[in-house]
Image (cartoon, rainbow, N blue to C red):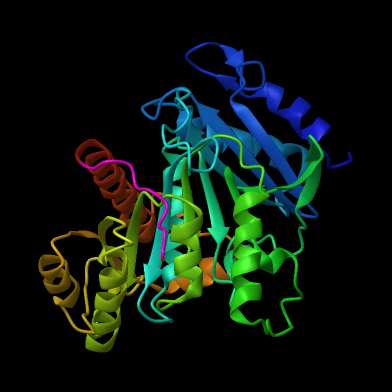
Amino acid sequence: MELNNQIIEEILKNVVHPESGTDIVSLNILDNINIDEENVEIVLVFEKSTDPFINSIKRSVKSEIEKHFGDDLIINITSRVKVKPKAPPKNANGIEGIENIIAIASGKGGVGKSTVTVNLAVALAQKGYRVGVVDADIFGPSIPKMFGVEDIKPTGTKEDGKEFIIPVEKYGIKMLSVGFFVNPADATIWRGPMATGVLKQLIDQAKWGELDYLLFDMPPGTSDIHLTLVQSVPVTGAVIVSTPQDVAIADARKGVAMFKSKGIEVPVLGLVENMAWFTPAELPDNKYYIFGKGGTQKLAEEADTQVLAQIPLVQSVCESGDGGRPAAVDISSVIGKAFSDFADKFLDAVEKRNKELPPTKQVIIK
């Protein structure tokens, strides 16, 4: 039997939702099928997160596919929840159809900022939100690899005489990166104006549709890229990622100061302490603070913000990122739960910011 989307859809008509007695295809629970050689990715969408049959339906989907094609296939099944349509953003200066624009930044490299961005995006999508990611780390793009889409090229479309880039989509997340357009083995050697020009193109020429959150994975430090972002779009808020080491905290402090500085004034939603402690897979309850402890909380108090998450250092995070399957996809794991909890606090922080503060305006630097 040939492995293709149409055959998979026919097979999954045998999977019935116990509550309604109707198959998941007719109920529009089957949202997307993506086949890449021996890898099959299935996305299911449910009406509510409390549906008691989500896990049993996912097991049935896997079992039904294996029944016809054997168990040699790698089958990834993710689920999300339908979100009621929202009104377009009130700020006319924003990207059309985008509710919230979030900068994920860090003071220095190597703290896992891209890992945090990718897994936050996955956790938000699992909760039913419409999410996009822009890889704004122009000189060191890593988003394509972390999502396992390095070999995919974005397509284009033309509307009213203007050309648009259609983002690549996986795990229900839309994404764009300069990494889709350059050879990953080549060094990206661009002067500042060239790099900022690429970012503007990713912002202005993307066909995002309607999104609840568009996350920008920023380069480390403070640079022209950061200024270009806040000048190009009204940024709802920033999340600063750090590790517990003193040197990382010192650089994170600079990142907080940049967003809060006069003339930029982008609200800092909170801090994320990555690699907060080491937890061995065989001893999930043990915590070893190998990089120090308490620095991120101290910085949060200094900056009048909060710690949104403490993400433990576990081997599966690195393996998942390198393998193109973000750790947050497995919501039952220690790291999956950590990112799910992070997403909840992040959502609360954005809601609080939008209630208490006026919409952010694009920065005009004289």
Q: In the image, 261: left or right of 122? A: left
Quarter of the image holding residue 21? top right
Q: In the image, 297: left or right of 243? A: left
Q: In the image, 271: left or right of 327? A: left
- Dominant secondary structure (helix, strand or loop) of the stretch shown in magenta: loop
Stretch of the chain drawn in magenta: 357-365
Tell me the residue at 67%/66% (across/down): 178
Q: Is residue 330 visible?
A: no
Relative height, residue 349 to residue 223 (above, below): above
Outermost residue, front direction?
366
Queried whether the magenta region covers residue 358, the answer comes back as yes
Outermost residue, right direction?
2
Tell me the residue at 63%/31% (across/down): 31
Nearest the viewer among 338 and 191 is: 191
Residue 186, position as x, y percentages in the image? 74, 83
Location of the N terminus (image quadrant): top right
Q: Can residue 19 be seen in this view?
A: yes
Location of the C terminus (image quadrant): bottom left
Relative height, residue 169 to residue 90 (above, below): below
Residue 245, position as x, y percentages in the image? 25, 85
Relative height, residue 35 to residue 16 (above, below): below
Tell me the residue at 18%/59% (across/down): 306
Outermost residue, bottom direction?
247
